[in-house]
Amino acid sequence: MSGLLDGKRAIVTGAGSGVGRASARRFAEEGAHVAVADIQGDAAKETAQKIESAGGTAVPITCDVSKEDDVVEMIANAVEAFGGLDIIFNNVGIPTPRLGALLEDHTVEEFDRLVAVNLRGVFLGCKHAVLQFKKQDTGGVILNTGSVAGLVGWGGTPYGATKGGVHQITRGIAIECAPFGIRANAICPAAMPFTNFMAAGGLEVDDDALKGIAEHVGSGHPLGQPITAEDCAEAAVYLVSDRAANVTGVLLPVDGGYVAR
């Protein structure tokens, strides 16, 4: 039985953990050759090794998506490894640095860092993927990670603003690039307790505490469950596959019904 992504050549950023790792593994399970990119080179290698051990094809790439030279090199390395590019999943994102911080609590340095990673990183990934797709003249697929925080007033206002920018880049590219057979969509997750955000914040919790966090987070969603990396990966597989061949410019909430209320 063939996979949904047989023979597709993909890049997944932030693939060393969380949504990126889950998506890279699912892409590979569906037959894609995956360039596993992460600012943490060892984490990228670990994901690539897991994919290879499961019979898939992957190459690790160390990349800081906020730096244009790194993004250019990332795409060049993927093209060299696989002979071209069909899919890019611009997944990297960082959270509000201090949970619960109000707009006026944020420093300019914190704001600039959020913009550099969450917004400029997506801009650079989209820009250079589009250049590669047009060079190949074969079309292509862009998927970005947005957030429900960019769809509603969620809190963490600077973070939400960067995700709102990701949404606008996604829709703008969908229109600009439609004549070239290039599709662009975004997934918009709601609250996710099981991401690298907790590790990034220096939080270490035991299993009981983690269960309690999951229950608390899930209680904010109509379906009553927290959003997992695997939930996002399944949505990602669909949107980058040919099953979504006529789907572009979509901001898909993966949110247990949160924004439908």
Image (cartoon, rainbow, N blue to C red):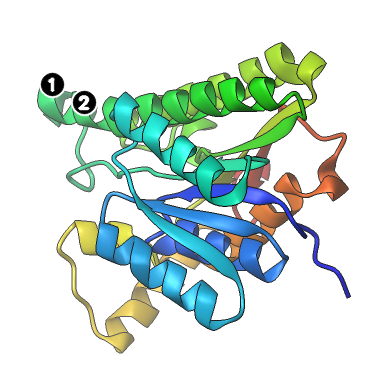
* 113 up-or-down from 222: above or below: above
Q: Report which residue position mark 1 lands on.
A: 108
In the image, 72 versus 110, the foreground residue is: 72
In the image, 141 versus 31, the foreground residue is: 31
Element on which disc 2 rests: helix
Quadrant of the image occupied by residue 163: top left
* 208 up-or-down from 43: above or below: below
Q: Residue at x 64, y 42 (%)?
A: 87
Residue 218 visible within the image? yes
In the image, 209 versus 147, the foreground residue is: 147
* CA neighbours of label 1 inside 10 A, class few (<14), some (14 to 19), many (20+): few
Q: Residue at x 27, y 58 (%)?
A: 41
Element on which disc 1 rests: helix
As drawn, the label of residue 94 is none
Residue 219 visible within the image? no
Q: Image check: 193 left or right of 254? A: left
For the C terminus, give its image quadrant. top right
Q: Report which residue position mark 2 lands on.
A: 111
Mark 1 and mark 2 in contact (Cβ < 8 Å)? yes
Give the residue type at disc 2: Phe
